[in-house]
Image (cartoon, grey):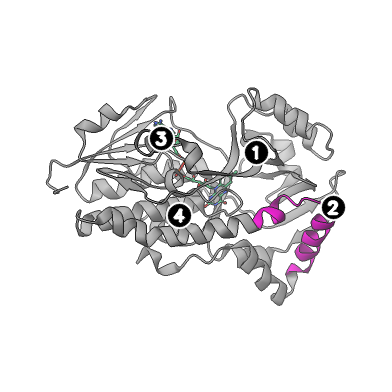
Amino acid sequence: MPKSSAQRALVVGAGIAGLTTAWWLERAGWEVLVVEKAPSFRAGGYMIDFFGPGHEVARRMGLLPALEARMAPISAVTSVDSRGRKRAEISAEAYEAVADGGISLLRGDLADVIRADLRSPIRYGATISVSDFDDFDLVVGADGVHSKVRELVFGPSSRFVRYLGHHTAAFSFNDAELSARIGYRYQMLTVPHRMIGCYAVRDGAMAALMLYRADSQALPVDARAALRERFGDLGWVTPELLSVVPEEIYYDEVSQVDMPVWHRGKVVLVGDACGAVSLFAGHGASLAMTGAFVLAEELAASTDGAFERYQARMKPVVLDTQSFGRKFIGWMAPPSAWRITVRDMAFRLSGLPVVRKLIRGSVTPAVPAGIVG
Ligand SMILES: Cc1cc2nc3c(=O)[nH]c(=O)nc-3n(C[C@H](O)[C@H](O)[C@H](O)COP(=O)(O)OP(=O)(O)OC[C@H]3O[C@@H](n4cnc5c(N)ncnc54)[C@H](O)[C@@H]3O)c2cc1C
C-alpha cells in the first residue's frame, strides 16, 4: 500500500472507533470517506466512564476541553433497595480514585465532539458490499460488535463473538423532576441476575441502564416488551423508567469479540469490530480510540507491516481487558442475594484506603499507559 496524496480510505462506521480513525487518517493526509448505517448521527445513548489511554488520545486530539464541557458530574455509586432506600454507596473519594482523572459522559457526546472536529464527509444511511471496497486503498471496519465488514471479509460472526450470557438496554430521556430526585449519582437496584440503574446527566436529562441474564443470545423482536416483562415486578423508580423507554433504544446482547487476525489485504478492523471487551470491562470506548490512534500511527510510520504492528500493540491489551471483563460479571450482575450483599459491603467499606485500592484493582483493568506511546 504505497501512500501518496491520492490515497483513499473508506471507514465503515461512525462510532467512536470510526470517527477517531478518520480524524487521525485525515490529519496524516488520507482522503477519507466515512459511511454509517444509521440514518443520522446517533446522539445520547449510555454513560461511559472515559479514562485510561483513550483519554490520553483525546488529549492529543485537543478535545479534552470540549469533552469536559459535556461531563456528567457523577459523584457516587449507590445501591438501593426496592423502596429506593440506600443499601450502600461508593464514597465520592473512592469514586474519584477509581475514575483516576477520567470523565463520565454520554457515548453520544464523545462521538459528537470527535465528529465536530472532523473534516471528512460522513455518508449516513449507507449499506456496504465488498464491491464498494474497490475504490479505496484502505478499508477500515469500525462497525462494532456485529461488524458487516468482518462478516464480508472474515466470515460469520458466530466464529468470533463470545456471548457473556446477558442482554442490556440503555437510553436517555428528559425528566426534570426525576433528575432532581436521583441527582448526579449512579443509583441502581440489583436483584439476582438483574440490575436497573439511572442517573441525572444534565439540564433535567437522565440516562438509564438495564442488564439481565438471558440464556438465549437471540434478541427479542420487541425490546420494550422484553424489558417490561423482565423488570415489571421491580419497585423503586422502575415503573417510571419502563414508562419512558423510547422506541429507539440501545438494546443488545453482551458479547466480546475474539479473532486471531484483525486484517486481510487492505482491510483492517478497529474497535469493537475486532476486540469488543463488553460493558462488563468498561474501557471499550477508550480502547476504540486507542486502537484508532495506534493504527493511524503505524500507517504513518510505514504502510508495510502496519497492520501487523498495530495488532501486536493492541491485542494483548484487548485480551487482558476481556479477561478482566469476564471476572467482573459477578460484580455488575451478581447471581445471588449473598453476592449482592458482599458487593454492597465492599461499597460500604470504600471509604477505607485499603478497600479503595482493592476496588480500584477490581473495577479497572491494568491497561498500560504507555500503549499510546
Ligand atoms: C451499556 C454500555 C456501557 C458501556 N460503558 C463503557 C464505559 O464506561 N467505558 C468505556 O470506555 N466503554 C464503555 N462501553 C463500551 C463502548 O461504548 C464501546 O466499546 C465503544 O463504543 C465501541 O466503539 P466502536 O466505534 O468500536 O463501535 P460502535 O460504538 O458500536 O460503533 C459502530 C458504528 O458502526 C455503525 N455500523 C454498524 N454496521 C454498519 C454497517 N454495516 N455499515 C455502516 N455502519 C455500520 C453503527 O451504527 C455504529 O455507529 C459501554 C458499552 C455499553 C453497551
The dot on residue 151 is: 3
- The tag earlier along the polypeptide, 1 or 3, is 3
Could you say which quadrant of the image residue 116 lies in? top left
Q: Which mark is residue 337?
A: 2
- Please check the rendered image and state whether residue 332 is part of the magenta-colored stretch, yes or no: yes
Which SS class for mark 1? strand
- Amino acid, disc 4: Leu
Q: Determine which residue is flagged by label 1.
A: 167
Label 4 vs label 1, nearer the camera: 1
Spatial distance from mark 2 to mark 4, Cα to Cα?
Answer: 33 Å
SS at badge 2: helix
Disc 4 to disc 1, C-alpha distance: 22 Å
Picture quarter with the C terminus? bottom left
**Whole-percent x, y for residue 53 in the image:** 44, 61
* Callout 4: CB less than 8 Å from ligand 1: yes
Q: CA distance from mark 4 to mark 3?
A: 22 Å
Labels 4 and 1: the sequence-earlier one? 1
Q: Residues within 10 Å of mark 4 (few under 14, many from 20)?
A: many
